[in-house]
Image (spheres, rainbow, N blue to C red):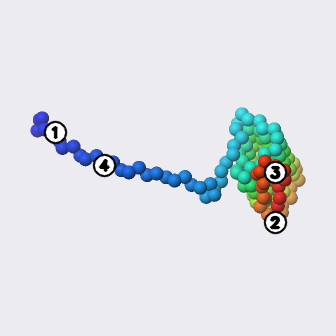
Amino acid sequence: MFGKKKPEEPVVIEKPVVKEETPARFVPSRVTTIGKDVTLVGDFITADTLEIRGTLKGDVVSETKIHIAEGGTLNGDAKATDILVDGQVDGRIVISNIAEISDTGSMQGALEVKTLVTNPGSHFDGRLSIVPERMKPHVDVSEDASAIEY
């Protein structure tokens, strides 16, 4: 009773599990973010999804998606597969799939899109062209890239 030690239970050490990183081609989408306190002036071309939390003054091309976050602003033209507008956009926008303007989103200018989704409270002022089908844009992200091809 007193003074007797209980036998210690053996300690089992498990072999650590090492997770291999997922190759980039299997990642659904990588994201490039323009931060909340950042103002970027100039054209922006990316193969990744682009999230704008700050301000972009210039044209933007994304091979995948563009997300203008609440409080974010895009002043310029844009081409992408999809766009989600929670902030403000002023320019000519060409989207090959879906454009969504949320209840906090505001868009001015021209929009060419396959499918437009608007939510109660959203704002759109401009020219709208619904096109039945567009090819996905091909983005050349090399240093000397100057155009987008469809």
Distance from label 3 to label 1 (Cα)? Answer: 75 Å
Q: Is residue 148 left or right of residue 68?
A: right
Looking at numbered disc 3 in the image, what kind of residue is underneath it?
Answer: Ala
What amino acid type is highlighted by mark number 4?
Val
Report the residue marked by disc 1. 5
Who comes first in sequence, dot 2 or dot 3? 2
Contact between labelled residues 1 and 3, with CB atoms less than 8 Å apart: no
Of callouts 4 and 1, which one flags the residue occurring earlier in the amino acid sequence? 1
Q: Nearer the viewer, residue 42 or 129?
A: 42
> Residue placed at 16% from the left, 39% from the top?
5
Q: Position of residue 122 (x, y in %)?
A: 77, 48
What residue is disc 3 on? Answer: 145
- N-terminal of the pair, mark 2 or mark 4, is 4
Asked whether the viewer can see residue 124, the reply is no
Q: Which amino acid is tagged 2?
A: Pro
Q: Residue 52, image x and y in percent?
A: 73, 43
Residue labelled with disc 2: 132
Quarter of the image containing the N terminus? top left
**Disc 3: CA contacts within 10 A as few (<14), some (14-19) or many (>=20):** few
In the displayed structure, 15 sits above or below 133; it is: above
Disc 2 to disc 4, C-alpha distance: 62 Å
Pair 3/1: label in front: 3
Helix, strand or loop for disc 3: loop
Residue position marked by numbered label 4 in the rendering: 12
